[in-house]
């Protein structure tokens, strides 16, 4: 491991989530009291890592709140100037910096349509927050490494809290409280597997596969690997993967598999069997021992966390893998070539 900013920020995540849970519960409960019944679907505007958090929200709000979630197409609001009608929507902007003009434009249009608007951001004084009716601060502190980690998991937590308070289900709210400890355990167990990452130091491509709530996790792990190492990491739903991209797998192909217990367990077990027959080199993140037995690198997650919260813990091994692979490739962990911390798109 390193003494990089990125490593420090990965390790800060349990404390960040604990602070967010204690600081924002009352605010989010009040927001939900004010917006409940005022919308029929959700539109989320985001880019990059925040877009992956929005993918989590699609499953979360769909499953727990029976709400359809659409990812906004910001170019329609800026480049084409043909914005869709957002009447009847809850319009959410997710942005670590709160500075991207195209995300801001979606919330501005939502307000014009009379839709309630909400900003989830690490900077409550940002331009995005200024155009929103409601703001949920992430309390992540300054994130100095270019690759976002703690702002990603805090965005997921904010969305999980929002969904739970909208539903009014105390069971969901109780389950969220276990996150800081579960994330601590994820960090500890993942670090034990990192010496094996050197096995993959020469790869130039890999696949990252998952499904359901952790569909978002596949995108986020792939993004971290691409950002930090330049490796071409492609993320897929296992269902989409079987419809064609599986043809890219051959002997020795590196394949990440995100395989929690729960609704997707059997689907992931079938996929792992197929990958073994193809001779793939598997990196498996799971809380199921029988699935981990098939891995070249095993990231053993503790059991007990409900599947809907596993994206908060299952992404951590991917963050640490990307960090360690960057070190093995002798690249700059905190300043990936060609990237800056804040990207403003129009």
Image (cartoon, rainbow, N blue to C red):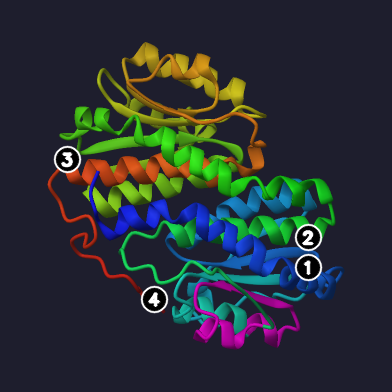
Which residue corresponds to mark 3?
Answer: 328
Q: Residue at x 30, y 44 (%)?
A: 322
Q: Dot 4 surroundings within 10 Å: few (below 14), some, or many (20 or more)?
A: few
Q: Tell me the distance, in whole angstroms, between the alpha carbons under discs 2 and 1.
A: 6 Å
Q: Tell me the distance, in whole angstroms, between the alpha carbons under discs 1 and 3.
A: 45 Å
Marks 1 and 4: which is nearer the front?
1
Marks 4 and 3: which is nearer the front?
3
Secondary-structure class at tag 1: helix
Q: Residue furthest left?
A: 330
Q: Position of residue 81 (x, y in %)?
A: 52, 83
Secondary-structure class at tag 3: helix
Q: Determine whether, in the image, residue 243 is placed left or right of residue 43.
A: left
Which residue corresponds to mark 1?
Answer: 29
Q: Quadrant of residue 338?
A: bottom left
Secondary-structure class at tag 4: loop
103 lies above or below 249: below
Q: Dot 1 surroundings within 10 Å: few (below 14), some, or many (20 or more)?
A: some
Magenta-highlighted residues: 109-132
């Amino acid at each position: 491991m390193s003494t990089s900013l990125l490593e420090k920020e990965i390790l800060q995540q349990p404390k960040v989530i604990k602070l967010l849970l204690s600081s924002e519960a009352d605010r989010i409960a009040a927001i939900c009291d004010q917006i409940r019944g005022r919308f029929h679907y959700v539109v989320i505007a985001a880019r990059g890592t925040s877009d992956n958090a929005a993918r989590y929200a699609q499953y979360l709000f769909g499953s727990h709140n029976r709400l359809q979630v659409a990812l906004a197409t910001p170019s329609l609001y800026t480049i084409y100037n043909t914005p869709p009608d957002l009447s009847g929507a809850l319009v959410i902007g997710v942005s670590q910096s709160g500075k991207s003009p195209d995300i801001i434009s979606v919330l501005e249009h939502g307000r014009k349509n009379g839709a309630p608007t909400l900003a989830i951001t690490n900077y409550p004084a940002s331009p995005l927050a200024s155009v929103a009716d409601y703001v949920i601060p992430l309390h992540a502190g300054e994130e100095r490494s270019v690759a976002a980690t703690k702002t990603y998991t805090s965005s997921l937590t904010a969305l999980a809290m929002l969904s739970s308070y909208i539903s009014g289900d105390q069971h969901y709210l109780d389950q969220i409280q276990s996150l800081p400890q579960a994330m601590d355990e994820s960090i500890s167990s993942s670090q034990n597997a990192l010496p094996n990452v050197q096995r993959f130091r020469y790869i130039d491509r890999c696949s990252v596969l998952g499904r359901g709530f952790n569909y978002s996790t596949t995108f986020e792990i792939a993004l971290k690997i691409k950002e930090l190492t330049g490796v071409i990491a492609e993320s897929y739903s296992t269902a989409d993967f079987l419809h064609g991209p599986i043809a890219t797998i051959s002997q020795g192909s590196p394949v990440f598999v995100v395989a929690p217990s729960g609704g997707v367990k059997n689907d992931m077990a079938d996929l792992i069997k197929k990958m073994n027959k193809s001779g793939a080199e598997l990196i498996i993140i799971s809380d199921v021992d029988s699935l981990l037995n098939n891995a070249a690198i095993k990231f053993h997650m503790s059991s007990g966390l409900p599947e809907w919260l596993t994206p908060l813990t299952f992404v951590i091994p991917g963050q640490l893998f990307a960090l360690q692979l960057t070190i093995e490739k002798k690249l700059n962990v905190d300043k990936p070539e060609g990237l800056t911390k804040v990207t403003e798109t129009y």
